[in-house]
Amino acid sequence: MRAAFLLLLVAALRLDAQVVERPVAFDSAGKVRSLTPSLVARFGLRPPAWPVSADFTQARLFAVSTGGSVLVAERRTGEMERYLLADDQVNALRAAVDSAMSQSGALVGEDRPDLISEPARGAFLRNQMILAAALYGPLLASLTDDVKTGTALYLISVGGSYFVLNNISKNTAITRAQNDLATDGAVRGAGTAVGLLRAFGGPDVNDKAYSAAALSGAIFGSLTGYAYGRRLTDSEAQSAIKGSTFAAATAFGIAGASSDLDGESAERFVAGSMVASGIIGYLVGPRYPRVASYTVTSGDVRLLPIGALLGALVGVTPFVDQNNDRLAFGAATLGGWAGILAADRAWARPFDHGTSDVTQVWLGTIAGALLGGGLIVLTETDNAVPALAMVTGGGLLGAIAGHHLADPPRAQPRRASLAPDLRSRGGRLAISLDPTALAFSAARVPGRHALISLRF
């Protein structure tokens, strides 16, 4: 009886015991909390270190309280596949991820710290359908001379695109970075094609040629963005988009400040320079979150256009009523870049912004500008300089208030566990001087402002 009682007691204790699974990172720095197919391809993970062979949407790693670890891969059908890993297998997988990160650069944070670039099948379908209705369809219809034929082509192209896109997204993993770049690539590709045709096509190009070029450029740009975003994180994708826009706008501002924009030859030069600068910015842009000494989220990158807009308005305001377009172009260009730098130092460096934070700041900027417009009406200001100053000042104060109301979390410093691998790349001493730190310190902008930086 005593033996039977002891056996029942042990069985009861075993039944009450629970197995606890704790989420852990794939890398030793604790940054990569999940893996998507794009990151697996970027890291070059293969068997035996990477056991998942079939297609999946997301994989996470858990440490088991009873010993060992389990890798959970979510399939497109919603099924969960579990792979039991011993400690040596986990160490091998972690070493492969660390080695890949030391070669391709440290990953950056996103809106959620446990996701690198989440699946975006629904958003991809929605955005491409909007593009089909607003861009692809009208351009295709404009290639015909008959209204009936054009209408039929428009309706067929928009309706048929749903089934084509749904089939593509159903059989292929699509991340948010791919969706962002595919959507932006369609618009940017159409503009690039039109700009190239304008720069090199000559004066006798008809409207149908521009429509055909825009349609071809939009499709090619969307496909290129989709492929380009396969190995990019969300912040890298946003940096490519914003870098291209800033570079093209800079080329336009420099052209306006250095020469007269009137005339066909000037228009061709401006179109060509903007296209070339935009492409360079598209390729160089992802380096911003990779080389920054602080964590750059996709929300941080989305805030930079606010700084560029407000900086350009501040720069151009004193010259708005002067008959000197070159001076206005130069002031707007310099002011825009000063605004980008200020947004980076005051917002991106000390905080980690999410999508909702960016929306809050944009709404605050718009609301402040509207209040400035109301002040113009109340004061019955006729002069352009004080009127624009009121709108700009209201937008600036509104942006600051919106950021304060958003209250984003403070930035988390990048961990230094990969420092030995990263130092092995160069090993040279670098000293940089940033005089803008004095201005930010004098203005009492929150955050750290380094006048002299030492890297080794």
Image (tube, rainbow, N blue to C red):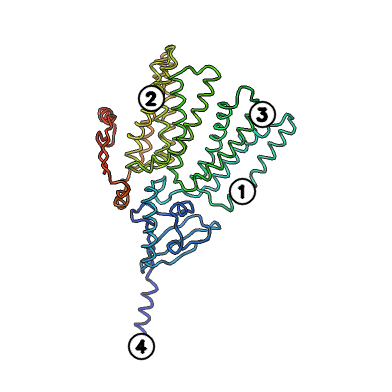
Say which label, 3 or 2, has the lower sequence index.
Answer: 3
User: Horizontal and vertical percent for residue 151?
Assistant: 71, 34
Tell me the CA gap for discs 1 and 3.
30 Å
Say which label, 1 or 3, has the lower sequence index.
Answer: 1
Residue at image position (42%, 23%) is 371
User: Horizontal and vertical percent for residue 155?
Assistant: 69, 38
Foreground residue, 412 or 319? Answer: 319
Q: Amino acid at mark 1?
A: Asn
Where is 370 relative to 124, above or below? above
Residue at image position (29%, 52%) is 420
Tell me the CA gap for discs 3 and 4.
96 Å
Mark 4 or mark 1, which is nearer to you?
Answer: 1
CB of mark 3 within 8 Å of CB of mark 2? Answer: no
Mark 3 or mark 2, which is nearer to you?
Answer: 3
Mark 4 or mark 2, which is nearer to you?
Answer: 2
* Left or right: 88 as drawn, with respect to 126: left
Tell me the CA gap for discs 3 and 2.
38 Å
- Disc 1 is placed on an element classified as helix
Say which label, 4 or 1, has the lower sequence index.
Answer: 4
Which of the numbered marks, if any, corresponds to residue 208?
A: 3
CB of mark 4 within 8 Å of CB of mark 2? Answer: no
- Disc 4 is placed on an element classified as loop
